[in-house]
Image (spheres, rainbow, N blue to C red):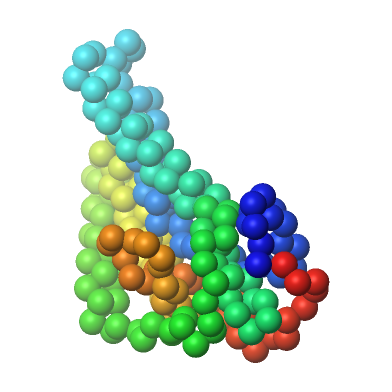
Amino acid sequence: MMEGAERSLDYVPEDRRVAESLGWQPGIWASFFLLVGCIILAESKSPPDLVMMEILGVVFFAGLVLALWQAVMHRNRTVLVRQDGMIQVFRKRRLDMVVAAQEIRLEKVDIVAIIKIGAPLAIAAALFLALGLAMLWKDRAANSGSLSALALGLVSTASLASAFWTRFFRRHLLVPVRNSRWLAEETVLLSVKQHKLLFSGEDGGRPL
């Protein structure tokens, strides 16, 4: 059992860590807001008036918050470590709990939920790409409206691809959460290779 400072993930060798594989949804939408902000800023008069500054402030703030969220998510990924037939669960780079492998369940694919998420994204991608291209054709020139519509269409496509990737190319594990008022289990995404390594591989290295 690790105690004190040794409960830190820093004391676990890299080759023994199985870090969750996260999607890029916050980063994808952060890029949209930052790109749209730059498009608006490029077309606005100099200096921008108060209303335009408020709009730009909201757009850039949303982009930066989403980008920060993506960075924090990846910094604080849940990490699983196999040791003596047990699974050590590290959250925010600290040992949170140790569970038996049998306590971690594989989440079933919910086709209805996938359709509810995927269908609106697919429709939005098609509509905004078509709208952006139609505006470009009509105006014979790029402007903030057509570029923003195209950006939204492309981002919706990227968001759909990310959702598809995380759903069908990742294993969704339900890992217990200790002392949480809101969650009994946390969904942790692993690749097929990581899943096999964690549950089929032999324990290696020195005891932690």
x then y, percent, for residue 84? 68, 81
In this view, the residue in front, 194 or 130, is: 194
The residue depicted at 73 percent of the width and 86 percent of the height is 202
Asked whether, in this view, residue 33 is left or right of residue 21, the answer is left
The N terminus: image quadrant: bottom right
**From this viewpoint, is residue 157 visible?**
no
Measured from the top left, where is residue 181 in percent x and y?
A: 28, 60
Quarter occupied by the C terminus: bottom right
Judge left or right: residue 93 versus residue 46: right
Query: Which residue is drawn at the image coordinates 37% and 54% (left, top)?
Result: 155
Give the quadrant of residue 198.
bottom right
User: Residue furthest toward the top?
Assistant: 47
Question: Residue 107, image x and y in percent?
Answer: 39, 82
At horizontal 66% and vertical 50% (from top left) the residue drawn is 5
Residue placed most toward the observer, 58 or 180: 180
Can you tell which quarter of the image residue 63 is in?
top left
Image-based side of 182 in relation to 92, left or right: left
The residue lying furthest to the left in this view is: 51
Residues 139 and 156: in front is 156
